Image (cartoon, rainbow, N blue to C red):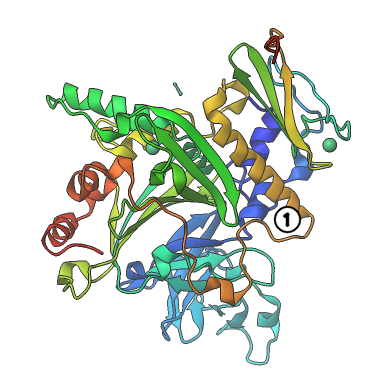
Amino acid sequence: MISYEQNQTLTQVGPGTPMGNLLRRYWIPVGAEVELEDKWTKRIRILGEDLVLYRDLKGKFGLIEEKCPHRGASFAYGIPEQDGIRCPYHGWCINHEGQCTEQPNEPEDSTFKNKIRVKAYPVERLGGMLFTYMGPQPVPLLPRYDAFATEGTIRIVGQAVLPVNFMQVMENSLDPVHTEWLHGHYHEFKSREMGRDVKVAFSRHHVKTAFDVFEYGIIKRRLLEGQSENVDDWRVGHPVVFPFTLAVGSGGLGTYALQMRIPIDDTHTWHIWYNAYVPGEGVEVPPALQKLCLYDVPWQDESGEFITDYIDGQDIMAWITQGAVADRTDEHLGTTDKGIILLRKLFMEQIAKVENGEDPLGVIRNPELNEMIVLPLERKKHHFSEGFESVTMRFQTRFCPVVQELIDLFSKVGIK
Amino acid sequence: MLKGRPMQQRRPEISVPKHTRKLFCPNCSQPLLNERSLLVKYWRAQDTVYYCYCSHCAWCGEIVDNARVVISELDEGS
Ligand code: FES
Ligand SMILES: [Fe+2]
Ligand SMILES: [Zn+2]
């Protein structure tokens, strides 16, 4: 239970808000490169700002505010140029810095264009994704987390727009015991209802959980009933990468799985599941898996009910039913919620850091530290003990159009 | 409606959530209910616990409303 004002501080992400200012200190995904292969623009909304991502004629990506400064038509219908984008309405041209460079119908010697500037943000590519930085100068480095920076991986990326504030999605990642219920007992109950009597590894009881702040976020660890303290689940754990990413353990399968929760605005989150698989030595990757596969993750059936027979769908149901912005003035936290309390404190501390003119947690400026950031991850994870196919088909990966090729490749020749 | 409200436009008064105590920082005595601090109420068995983070002095720790005081006696002779 926290106060209304503290809940606002933790959940408002628009320009000028404390959380909005903090989140703008990080590189934020805005799309996948493949999205702009057959088209030039993509409308996006990030941190309450309506923007247009575009590719210019030289192949460079840009991001500017959606509305043309002239009379407000959308750059989503813009014309790509050598260095920027042109408004379709009267042809004003804007470069990557947001400077207006042409107003074709103004007098030839007019300097009016020099006065016109729009919001524009830099775009960088990594691991098949496009990222932007919306904060003040100087721009920090785009973090080269192992999942993105590892070369030659097979990449499949699920996405969904969820009508929910990002903070409750992040709190879910600091709540290890929910897995035992939501993905364990509830999953078993759902399966029984559908005529399948299954017992899943997720339902194993938690003996204890622990949380440690490290240089990129919080590592969470769990000890399950019957495990010795030597197991990876307890010894190593896996991290929540501050401020909006969960890195799920690989289960020793040569896989990386990031769940990124990008705030669209106070009541919507763009959820990305970035999965990268390292093929084994000398393995030939079939054509279907050579290019990043971006797909939608459905979470509602035709009647508008949540689809809860897969793991991520169960989480989505829980997040959204909490309300668009969870009312934290009316919750009842217990001792198993200590990870959530730690996360809230970490956000408040980092907000204070930004206000004191310091870099918040995980912002990187030293290129030597950024060649490849290897995140701590369990290699052997109890929750993934049922094998690649079973786990892959119980997560949102089941919706990937090339999932069968992935499973076949894995069962035939293996993944590192 | 989806835009965040800038800080200046916020309501000046601080609301006290139901059943929450109006607590002050044990280190610097500033109110812990302000919008940049954190006063998280939770329950540990019978006890009510307030996890505190003070935005003024960065102190963090817990304040506990004890329902009972339990002390174990030292073993005689040891
Ligand atoms: S038991 Fe946790 S939300 Fe209901
Ligand atoms: Fe979950
Ligand atoms: Zn204080």
Does residue A262 appear anywhere in the picture? no
- Residue A390 placement (x, y as % from top left): 19, 44
Picture residue at 49% right of the left edge, 77% below the top: A85
Picture residue at 60% right of the left edge, 59% below the top: A362
- Residue A195 placement (x, y as % from top left): 12, 24
Quarter of the C terminus of chain A within the rendering = bottom left
Please tell me in which quadrant of the rendered image residue A228 appears: top left
Please tell me in which quadrant of the rendered image residue A154 appears: bottom left
Q: Is residue A369 left or right of residue B15?
A: left
From the viewer's perspective, is residue A384 above or below residue A148? above
Residue at disc 1, CB closer than 8 Å to ligand 3: no
Does residue A251 appear anywhere in the picture? yes
Q: Residue furthest bottom?
A: A109
The residue that disc 1 covers is A354
From the viewer's perspective, is residue A137 above or below residue A402? below
Instruction: Pick whichever, A38 or A366, lies toward us.
Output: A366
Quarter of the N terminus of chain A within the rendering = top right
- Residue A76 placement (x, y as % from top left): 44, 66
Three-letter amino acid code at the position of disc 1? Val
Disc 1 residue crowd, few under 14, some 14–19, many 20+, Cα 10 Å: some
Q: Secondary structure at mark 1?
A: helix
> Which chain hosts label 1?
A
Q: Is residue A295 left or right of residue A221?
A: left
Picture residue at 71% right of the left edge, 18% below the top: B20
From the viewer's perspective, is residue A315 above or below residue A64? above
- Residue A156 placement (x, y as % from top left): 29, 60
Picture residue at 61% right of the left edge, 34% below the top: A341
From the viewer's perspective, is residue A396 above or below residue A326? below
Report ligand 3 position as a quadrant.
Answer: top right
Q: Is residue A182 left or right of residue B51?
A: left
